[in-house]
């Protein structure tokens, strides 16, 4: 799995290297996962320390929108109804 920072993701996206983006929501937080145009390779955005970057849902969507992304898949498989709401 590829692990890249936001700046590298933006460059890769603008170069046409990103095929799909998925916003994965867990415990009211989101992470950005993606698949590349190079086949089945997948990845996530990480922090400078190499940890998977955790976003507020609104912040992740704003970042993706600023890049020009118009559509994103949402994976709520690990979000539970008892959480009542997502942080937006």
Image (tube, rainbow, N blue to C red):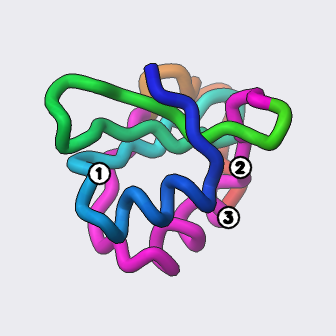
> Could you say which disc has been placed on residue 59 in the image?
3
Name the side, left or right, on which 85 lies relative to 78: right
Q: Position of residue 71 (x, y in %)?
A: 28, 64
Name the side, left or right, on which 24 lies relative to 31: left
Crowding around mark 1 (Cα neighbors within 10 Å: few <14, some 14 to 19, many 20+) is some
Out of 69 and 6, give the one closest to the viewer.
6
Question: Which residue is located at x 30 percent, y 73 percent?
Answer: 70
Q: Quadrant of the C terminus?
A: bottom right
Q: Is residue 82 above or below residue 4?
A: above
Residue to which mark 1 is pinned: 18
Label 3 with label 2: CB-CB less than 8 Å: yes
Q: Secondary structure at mark 1?
A: strand
Question: Which residue is located at x 76 percent, y 28 percent?
Answer: 51
Out of 74 and 48, give the one closest to the viewer.
48
Question: Which residue is located at x 46 percent, y 44 percent?
Answer: 23
- Seen as rendered, the residue at the extreme right is 49
> Could you say which disc has been placed on residue 55 in the image?
2
Q: Secondary structure at mark 3?
A: helix
Queried whether the magenta region covers residue 81, the answer comes back as no
Crowding around mark 2 (Cα neighbors within 10 Å: few <14, some 14 to 19, many 20+) is some
Magenta part of the chain? 50-75
Label 1 with label 2: CB-CB less than 8 Å: no
């Amino acid at each position: 799995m590829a692990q890249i920072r936001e700046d590298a993701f933006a460059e890769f996206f603008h170069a046409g290297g990103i095929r799909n983006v998925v916003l994965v929501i867990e415990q009211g937080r989101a992470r950005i996962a993606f698949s590349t145009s190079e086949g089945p390779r997948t990845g996530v955005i990480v922090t400078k320390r190499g940890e998977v970057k955790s976003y507020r849902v609104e912040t992740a969507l704003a970042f993706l929108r600023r890049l020009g992304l118009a559509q994103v898949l949402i994976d709520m498989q690990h979000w539970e109804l008892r959480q009542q709401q997502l942080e937006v």
